[in-house]
Amino acid sequence: MGIIEGFTEFLPISSTGHLILTSSILNLKQTDFLKSFEIAIQLGAVLSIVFLYWKSFLAERETLKRVLVAFLPTAIGGIVFYKIFKNVLLENSNIVLWALFSGGIFLIIFELLYREKENSIERISELPYSKSFFIGAFQIIAMIPGLSRAAATIIGGLALGLKRKTIVEFSFLLAVPTMLGAVVFDLIQNAGKFSFEQINFLAVGFIISFITAILSVKLLLRFIKNHNFVIFGFYRIILAFLFWLII
């Protein structure tokens, strides 16, 4: 599960959805610990961004300001909808499959219609704060497992006039406060309930997702130089059909 989380976190295919489906295949019961595990190991993937982009967090203040502005609507939405997300959405594989399927169709249609403009925003530091806020608002939609946080922010950013590489990297950076906040909030609620053995499981998942995510990020940055995300849309649709046949 650590490998799956690290590889899928920054791709527009929903890491949370993949973790839920993996749990289903492995016949893992959706206990409170498993739900927390699925949230917590995302921190390993997110910290890979800190490792790769530490200069953006320490030296580029204008970039950091825009990341924090984008984080605001997500933070509010996360607090408001936390119980629904954990107690309802994370337990429903059918929601994941429909989200993967419909999100795949939308992704394909968007990419077929999308044309990048010559005056698209190339630097994150030039991004208006209003657009930063709206990109963050797109993440609230992605609380539905299967839709994908990465897909929501990337499509939102492209629609708002950012270059593909710019919004992909902004999505990377925005994942840090978003997932850090989600993990900290969940651990405050539940950490006292975990056994020592369960904490070991969290540590293993964290480390593996961290390593895998570094590789995934580098592959994605190479991929977007010459490709759009249509292939991921087809992947989502095929995956949903396969699981409808299996489950």
Image (spheres, helix red, strand yellow):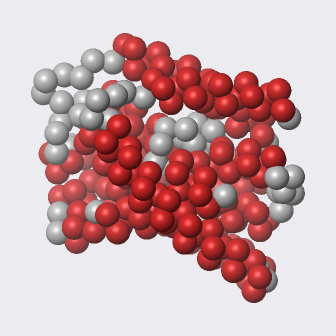
215 lies above or below 33: above
| Residue in front for this viewpoint, 140 or 123 | 123
Residue at horizontal 23 percent and vertical 63 percent from the top: 56
Farthest residue, direction bottom: 196
Specify the quadrant of the image occupied by residue 115. top left
Residue 190 horizontal/vertical position (percent): 72, 74
Q: Quadrant of the N terminus?
A: bottom right
17 lies above or below 181: above
Residue at horizontal 73 percent and vertical 24 percent from the top: 241
Residue at horizontal 37 percent and vertical 61 percent from the top: 49
Asked if residue 221 lies left or right of residue 103, the reply is left
Q: Is residue 160 visible?
A: no
Q: How many marks?
A: 0
| Residue in front for this viewpoint, 247 or 162 | 247
55 lies above or below 166: below
Q: Quadrant of the C terminus?
A: top right
Q: Is residue 154 visible?
A: yes
Residue 65 horizontal/vertical position (percent): 25, 59
Residue at horizontal 47 percent and vertical 42 percent from the top: 11
Asked if residue 106 lies left or right of residue 112, the reply is right
Residue 78 horizontal/vertical position (percent): 56, 55
Specify the quadrant of the image occupied by residue 203. bottom right
Residue 234 horizontal/vertical position (percent): 56, 23
| Residue in front for this viewpoint, 111 or 222 | 222
83 lies above or below 234: below
